[in-house]
Image: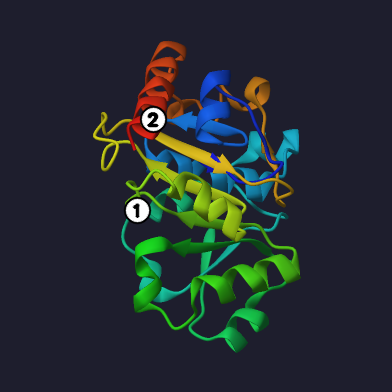
Amino acid sequence: MSTCSSWNFTGPLAPASRRSLAWRPALVTSGAAASLLLGTAACVTKGDPDRIHRLPDTAGMPHEVIVQPAHLHGFEHAIRAAGGRFVPVETLEGLERAIGPQTAMLYFLAYGEAKGRIGMAEWIAVGRRRGIPNFLDAAAELPPSGNLRRYCDAGFDLVAFSGGKGLARPAAFGAAARAEGSRGGAVSQRRATRRLRRPGLQGRQGGDHRTADGDRFVHKA
């Protein structure tokens, strides 16, 4: 998973990969679906230890995830597993009305843009203006390697990538990147490892191998 902002993700990521892939920072996960799970957990809990301990029980905390129905494709169940509840919208006016105190994040599917009525640029603009974390599912968007930076630079706060497609690495490899100055929360290594986060992580050795895979992918492009 790639985090495009100042979210506090900590995990097995080699410093060389931070530099060469421009994942600022990034969390290597067990797949793009795990990135959706953990990114949603970050948006919902905002690093609060009590909230992290309670997931997927989200009573009393913002947990609504706004989405266009055309962007639901099956893998979004990973978002529900973190306690997220989808709020469907189909127009810009509907998006503006749907944002409220219970909104945890906005969810956008990269390859679903042509199917929905709200474009990527408009979606990003509303999230930034309203101060809501914006999560992009870009699991199918590699190659080109430039997409590792493109979506963060465009304004998304979190971006989930898959290693099992264009990177041609094991399917049990994903990455979550964050952008400079993004809004959101934290999934702390110490507190969350034994809870919701642990099943979604790569082991230390696997994380080192997968970040090396990412480096090779970028340098070959």
Residue 216 falls left or right of residue 135: left
The residue lying toward the viewer, choosing from 179 and 52, is 179
Query: Which residue is rendered at x = 59% and y = 41% of the image?
Result: 55
The residue wearing badge 1 is 75
Task: Find residue 62 and report its image quarter.
Answer: bottom right
Q: Secondary structure at mark 2?
A: helix
Q: Earlier in the sequence, mark 1 or mark 2?
A: 1
Q: Which residue type does callout 2 highlight?
A: His
Query: Which residue is rendered at x = 75% and y = 38% of the image?
Result: 48
Whether residue 80 is visible here, answered yes or no, is: yes
The residue lying toward the viewer, choosing from 74 and 92, is 92
Quick one: label 2, few (<14), some, or many (20+) residues within 10 Å? Answer: few
Q: Secondary structure at mark 1?
A: loop
The residue wearing badge 2 is 219
- Relative to 151, say whether 164 is above or below: above
Task: Find residue 45 and report its image quarter.
Answer: top right
Whether residue 156 is visible here, answered yes or no, is: no
Q: CA distance from mark 1 to mark 2?
A: 30 Å
Q: Which residue type does callout 1 highlight?
A: Phe
Question: Total label count?
Answer: 2
Q: Position of residue 131 (x, y in %)?
A: 75, 63
